[in-house]
Image (tube, rainbow, N blue to C red):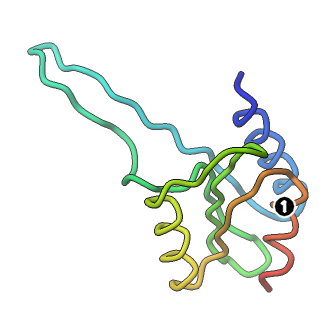
Amino acid sequence: MTEEHSIQNAVRRALSENGCVIFRINVGKGRTFDGRYFDTGVPVGFSDLFGVRQSDGKAIFIEVKTKTGRIRPEQKNFIEKMRRSGAVAGICRSTEDAIRLITEDK
């Protein structure tokens, strides 16, 4: 398991214990039987974790990064769009960041 996946799992657990329902996004690429390639999943830039804050039903989008991980322009753009739409959205590098995100945005 990569460091980022470990952080994602820790964030999911922490937020679940703090009144949120959180899901991890999985994407993939493949090839059909006749040789055509395809992508599955969500649009480019979609956050690693998403869910809802149960206290008010507000959507949550979290891009998880390691201490040195860089955010891509598409990820930053997605987070900004979600914030403008009224969602709780941000970049988190730890469980503390994630808890701060969901509690400060009330």
Q: Residue at x 62, y 72 (%)?
A: 59
Give neighbour class at mark 1: few <14, some 14-19, many 20+ (Cα, 10 Å): some
Percent of width and height locating residue 8: 73, 42
Which kind of residue does numbered mark 1 sit on?
Asp
Q: Total marks drawn? A: 1
Q: Residue at x 40, y 31 (%)?
A: 28
Q: Residue furthest left?
A: 34
Badge 1 is on which residue?
Answer: 97
Q: Residue at x 90, y 58 (%)?
A: 96
Percent of width and height locating residue 17: 90, 55
Above or below residue 106? Residue 73 is above
Q: Secondary structure at mark 1?
A: helix
Percent of width and height locating residue 18: 89, 62
Task: Please tell me in which quadrant of the rendered image residue 68 appears.
Answer: top right
Above or below residue 12? Residue 59 is below
Viewer-nearest residue: 91 or 29: 91
Above or below residue 51? Residue 9 is above
Q: Residue at x 63, y 55 (%)?
A: 63
Percent of width and height locating residue 24: 61, 44
Asked whether, in this view, residue 21 is left or right of residue 23, the answer is right
Viewer-nearest residue: 60 or 78: 78
Above or below residue 39? Residue 34 is above
> Which quarter of the image is occupied by the C terminus?
bottom right
> Which quarter of the image is occupied by the N terminus?
top right
Task: Please tell me in which quadrant of the rendered image residue 62 appears.
Answer: bottom right
